[in-house]
Image: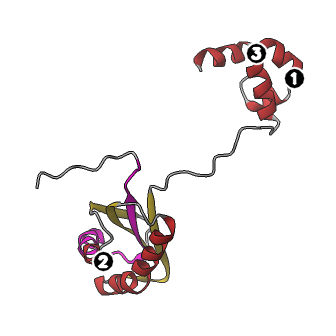
Amino acid sequence: GEVSIEKLHLAGFFTCKDIKGADYRDLLLKFGRQGASLWKRSHGIDEREVIIERERKSVGVERTFTQNISTYAECWQVIEDKLFPELETRLEKASPSKAIIKQGIKLKFADFQQTTIEHIHASLDREHFKELLSEILKRQQGREIRLLGLSVMLQPKEQVKQLSFF
């Protein structure tokens, strides 16, 4: 915190390199357990458990093209033949039981500018991607497309489902 930073600065420590060059016992005397911990971490010693599990928030697939594309038909063919089936497979592997809350499309143009569009949609729906593609291509402004991607955002575990009145 702020107080620790102030104490470290008063003692002449401004970077990790400063701490690494300090004597372990001096840090222990000046800063106690925190000093010992800082010295160890500055030397690459960290006994904390590595947390490798985290909640997946989204699943996506994308393709960068060797030759740019530009039409709705070309984009839709890539989605239909490659991206959508791959997204279905990845979604099933990654989180078969999680609910979808949004679908999205990403475009990167030949000038490396990119744009994305997401809409709330509660299931993986090929037809909804058609609507999104039509909308996002309005932003194309004559530019060629070098990358096309699909994604779905997943419902967090802690999010409570909205009850319906009907």
Image quadrant assignment for residue 43: top right
Look at mark 2 in the image and give the residue it sits on: 126
Residue 30 appears in the figure: yes
Give x and y (percent) for residue 51. 64, 46
Give x and y (percent) for residue 12. 76, 17
Q: Vertically, is 166 above or below 22?
A: below
Q: Vertically, is 158 above or below 22?
A: below
Q: Which residues are magenta?
A: 131-157
Look at mark 3 in the image and give the residue it sits on: 31
Q: Vertically, is 51 above or below 142?
A: above
Residue 147 appears in the figure: no
Q: Name the residue rendered at 30%, 72% in the picture.
A: 140
31 and 12: which one is in front?
Answer: 31
In this rendering, the label closer to the viewer, 2 or 1: 2
- Using the image, tell me which numbered label, if any, was put on residue 24: 1
Which kind of residue does numbered mark 1 sit on?
A: Tyr
The number of numbered badges drawn on the structure is: 3
Q: Is residue 88 magenta?
A: no
Give x and y (percent) for residue 145. 40, 76
